[in-house]
Image (cartoon, rainbow, N blue to C red):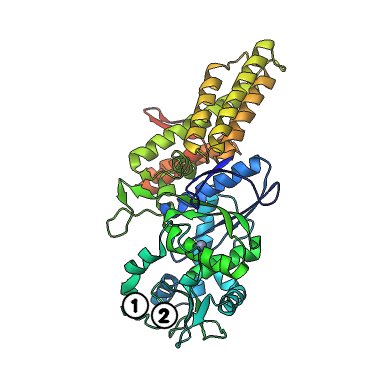
Amino acid sequence: MKIYNTLSKRKEEFEPLEEGKVKMYVCGPTVYNLIHIGNARPMIVFDTVRRYMEHKGYEVNFVSNFTDVDDKIIKKAIEEGVEASVISERYIAECKKDMQALNVKEATTHPKATQEICGMLDMIGTLIEKGHAYRAEDGTVYYRTRSFKGYGKLSHKNIDDLQGGNRSLLVSGEDQKEDSLDFVLWKPKKDGEPYWESPWCNGRPGWHIECSVMSKRYLGDEIDIHAGGEDLIFPHHENEIAQSEAANGKPFAKYWMHNAFLNIDNRKMSKSAGNFFTVRDIIEKYDPQVLRFFMLSAHYRSPLNFSAELMDAAKNGYDRIVTSVSNLKYLLENATSDTMSEEEKKLAEEAKGFTAKFDEAMDDDFNTADAIAAIFELVKFVNTNTDAESSREYLSSLKEELVMLSDICGLLVEKKQEMLDSDIEALIEERQAARKAKNFQRADEIRNELLSKGIVLEDTREGVKWKRA
Ligand SMILES: [Zn+2]
């Protein structure tokens, strides 16, 4: 299995620190709002990496944090006149709902920054002791960036080039710094802000120290994979390396993985440009599985463009897999023979080739675009090589393969529960009543709810007809 390592800028063979185990840390969101679809990309991508590794037999310890103390959270809390924790807890709950809808597995541990202050005080203390950090007069603790020899190794930046670019910081109020490159580990409290006591001043942690500390606490000093969006490479991940390696005296993460940006209609997503979508906006219009499918339709290191047309194409693609699985189910229920014929044995063997293709794509730095292409080849094979004469053994072997590959991508393609005819008809009646009352929103909701369960409605002159997709 090869992974593109941002640190070495090349694909490397994956060799875990400990045989059969993977220690993986993914930077999570700052929780002050509903997550947007840009946040969803790393969640889906690295969940798929985890699923594939588990499929390969690794035991994955997956840690992803919530940043629950931050300027934006505090600002919102002041606006609403509530404690910062009210805001962060609200949006952690909402984020978890979205992740569940997108079939992102729960992390082994989901630490919150505010619960880890002790560890942060410890690490900052160690850094001061070792000469990598210092307290300024007002109580702010800064990391002494030039004291860390490897600074710039992840972002491939030369420390002296950074100096030139950052000079302006010296005149913007941070005049207590020894050097313009130094960054904050601990800062004094301001009025109305949450704060913790520390040996340096009452205050709160800087953002970078959080991840170094949570990664150490739940995974140890050395980990296999550290991941996040490419916008985190500099300065966040560069600073994490400087903190962790200076404090622990050991290399931090072996492999650094970064996903590329998500654009909307070929432009950068931004609220002011009016092209900003939360996950909630999208999954109200589409099955969440379609969004997941869309995110995986490109390689994670390629920029991905989001548009209504591309989502419609993703819907068609996803539906093709779902339809193929439900066809197999139908054939299985009605099959007349049990065991595979000689001819079917050969075909089943041939079909295993698609799993090999899928694995080959995933082994090459998690190329989900090619892996999904292999699923489509299997779908085509299934559709052309099965019929009412097929045996149960043969059909279930194909179904298992198709469901397994989809499941590695986290795509739910099997309807877990079939709806009863009476429930469907009750909903159709309710929809008719809603339409009569001109409550078209409710009518559409019902149509979509049924659709998500594989029930297609057709309005005909004789009334509403329905069928299972
Ligand atoms: Zn982080």
Residue matched to label 1: 170
What amino acid is at disc 1? Leu
* Vertical side of 264 occupied by 351: above or below: above
| Quarter of the rendering occupied by the N terminus | top right
Question: Is label 1 in a helix, a strand or a loop?
Answer: helix
Circle 2 residue:
177
Q: Nearer the viewer, residue 286 or 207?
A: 207
Q: Earlier in the sequence, mark 1 or mark 2?
A: 1
Local secondary structure at mark 2: loop
x and y percentages locating residue 360 in the rendered image: 56, 32
Q: CA distance from mark 1 to mark 2?
A: 8 Å
Q: Nearer the viewer, residue 257 or 281?
A: 257
Asked whether residue 98 appears in the rendered view, the answer is: yes
Amino acid type, label 2: Lys
345, above or below 324, in the image: above
Q: Quadrant of residue 64?
A: bottom right
Q: Position of residue 408 (x, y in %)?
A: 59, 39
